[in-house]
């Protein structure tokens, strides 16, 4: 038993040694196999790499060969093109050489011809000088004198040509301008037509009977004196049946007197206290009427925003006349006309209408303040803060200053149209005759005018010219000079036609 126990550890140790040796032997064998396998893989990889290397070299050689062939082909093509260009250049050089030879021949021929022409020119100059000498001998005239004659003929022809050109340009401008102006003005006038009431500085009041005249005069004339003192109006009582006349330059005072007198006649109680009472009532009525007239004018023209005092001044124009034309109606017409003209040509309609309505506003106070109605109108417009464009229309409507806006020109035109209507204006016989005499004097002041006649109420002047002094071309220039002098020196409504007449008469007698 003890022996068996001793052998067991021996066997265990021997077993462990045997296992260890076996494992080591197996590991070495496995390592050797792996190394052999790795060597084989490396060898195979080297063989495959060598093979691929050879393949790539072959492909590279083939690609290089292909590229070489393409380059050779391209070079051959370029050589062919270069050869073609060389042949073309050679051909062009040959052609240029031929052309140079031809040019040399032509130059030589032209030089010969030029020499021949110079010789002929010298011969011609000699012939011209000889002919000139012969002409001077025949005509008994030097070349300078002949040149003066030719220049005079050229001047005459130039005047004639200039007159023809002026005539053509003027006619075309007239045709276009008159056509457009007629259309615009005709349309505006047709769209607006106003009536006119001719007023004077007197008003007539009808009486129920002639006995009323004595009551108006009163005891010892106290009623008429009171009436005239309070109203500032002359009361004329004459032999006119059933009527008395009120005379005053101020239309507002005359209207107050007319209303007061009619009220007194209707009431029947005429004495100084009643007269004073009726005059005060009449003043209030007229003031109310003035304000209403101004407001109606603003509504009629669709113009709003005026200062209340400007509206009152506008209403006072209802009782103001100028050359027999009611100024308020005239102002309303000018406003409408200027607005229509502005609409037709694309100007500012509001400015044109406002300027037209207020252009004569100064006439409402020109009886009370010093200055003409233009200056007074500008002062009133500035005082009541009117726009500067409207003030300019007022200031320029009689050319006291030069118009600077289209609207100012339109107000001028509308004012002239309104004033030129038949029956709109009256002028005294003396002024009328003086204007005609001045018109004829202007025409007679020009050289070559024999006599002149103003006809058609001064709207045309016929001028008889001397045919030996003025020819047909100079007549055109003379007519323009007459027109310019009339425009510069005369003031006249509308237009004046200048008609020049040239007539040649030959009179002889058979004996």
Image (cartoon, rainbow, N blue to C red):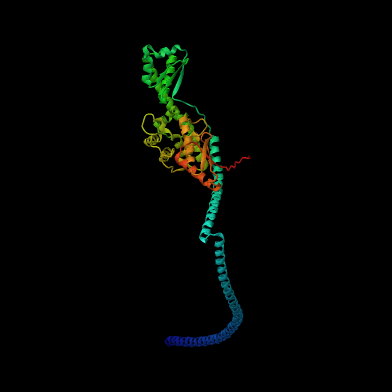
- In this rendered view, identify the residue nearer to me: 334 or 43: 334
Q: Residue at x 55, y 53 (%)?
A: 157
Residue 209 spot, x, y in % from top left? 47, 12
Count of picture labels: 0
Quadrant including the C terminus: top right
In the image as oriented, which residue stretches furthest toward the right?
510
Is the N terminus in the top left, top right, bottom left or bottom right quadrant? bottom left
The correct choice, above or below, for 234 with respect to 383 in the image is above
Q: Is 375 situated above or below 157?
A: above
- Decide if residue 192 is on the left or right side of residue 250: right
Is there any visible trace of residue 317 in the rendered image? Answer: yes
Residue in front for this viewpoint, 254 or 66 = 254
Q: Percent from the top left, x then y, of residue 30?
A: 50, 86
Q: Quadrant of residue 126?
A: bottom right
**Front residue of this view, candidates 300 and 157:** 157
Q: As displayed, is residue 243 above or below residue 169?
A: above
80 is higher (above) or lower (below) than 300? below
Residue 305 in the image: state x and y as whole percent. Answer: 42, 35
Is residue 459 in view from this perspective?
no
Q: Position of residue 191 (x, y in %)?
A: 54, 35
């Amino acid at each position: 038993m003890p022996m068996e126990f001793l052998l067991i550890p021996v066997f265990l140790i021997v077993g462990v040694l045997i296992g260890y040796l076996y494992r080591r032997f197996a590991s070495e064998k496995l390592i050797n196999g792996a190394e052999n396998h790795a060597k084989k893989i490396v060898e195979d990889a080297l063989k495959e790499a060598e093979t691929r290397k050879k393949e790539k070299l072959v492909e590279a050689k083939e690609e290089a060969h292909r590229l070489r062939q393409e380059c050779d082909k391209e070079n051959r093509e370029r050589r062919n093109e270069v050869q073609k260009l060389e042949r073309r250049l050679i051909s062009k050089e040959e052609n240029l050489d031929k052309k140079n030879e031809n040019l040399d021949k032509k130059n030589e021929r032209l030089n010969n011809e030029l020499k021949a022409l110079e010789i002929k020119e010298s011969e011609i100059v000699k012939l011209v000088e000889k002919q000139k000498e012969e002409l001077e001998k025949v005509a008994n005239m030097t070349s300078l004198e002949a040149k003066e004659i030719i220049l005079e003929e050229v001047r005459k022809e130039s005047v004639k040509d200039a007159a023809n050109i002026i005539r053509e340009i003027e006619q075309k401008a007239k045709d276009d301008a008159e056509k457009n102006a007629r259309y615009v003005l005709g349309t505006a006038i047709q769209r607006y037509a106003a009536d006119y009431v001719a007023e004077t500085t007197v008003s007539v009041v009808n009486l129920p009977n002639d006995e009323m005249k004595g009551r108006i005069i009163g005891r010892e004339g106290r009623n008429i004196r009171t009436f005239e003192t309070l109203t500032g109006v002359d009361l004329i009582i004459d032999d006119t049946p059933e009527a008395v006349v009120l005379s005053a330059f101020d239309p507002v005072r005359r209207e107050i007197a007319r209303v007061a007198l009619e009220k007194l006649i209707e009431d029947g109680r005429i004495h100084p206290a009643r007269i004073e009472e009726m005059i005060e009532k009449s003043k209030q009525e007229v003031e109310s009427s003035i304000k209403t007239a101004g407001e109606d004018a603003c509504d009629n023209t669709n113009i709003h925003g005026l200062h209340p005092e400007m509206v009152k001044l506008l209403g006072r124009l209802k009782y103001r006349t100028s050359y027999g034309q009611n100024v308020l109606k005239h102002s309303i017409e000018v406003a409408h006309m200027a607005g229509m003209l502005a609409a037709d040509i694309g100007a500012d309609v509001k400015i044109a209408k406002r300027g037209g309505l207020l252009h004569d506003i100064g006439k409402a106070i020109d009886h009370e303040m010093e200055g003409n109605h233009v200056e007074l109108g500008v002062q009133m417009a500035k005082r009541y803060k009117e726009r500067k464009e409207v003030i300019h229309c007022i200031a320029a409507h009689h050319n006291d200053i030069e118009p600077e806006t289209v609207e100012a020109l339109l107000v001028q035109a509308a004012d002239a149209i309104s004033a030129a209507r038949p029956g709109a204006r009256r002028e005294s016989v003396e002024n009328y005759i003086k204007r005609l005499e001045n018109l004829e004097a202007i025409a007679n002041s020009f050289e070559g005018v024999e006599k002149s006649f103003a006809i058609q109420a001064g709207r045309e002047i016929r001028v008889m010219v001397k045919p030996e002094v003025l020819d047909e071309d100079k007549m055109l220039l003379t007519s323009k000079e007459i027109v310019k002098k009339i425009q510069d020196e005369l003031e006249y409504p509308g237009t004046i036609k200048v008609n020049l007449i040239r007539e040649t008469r030959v009179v002889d007698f058979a004996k």
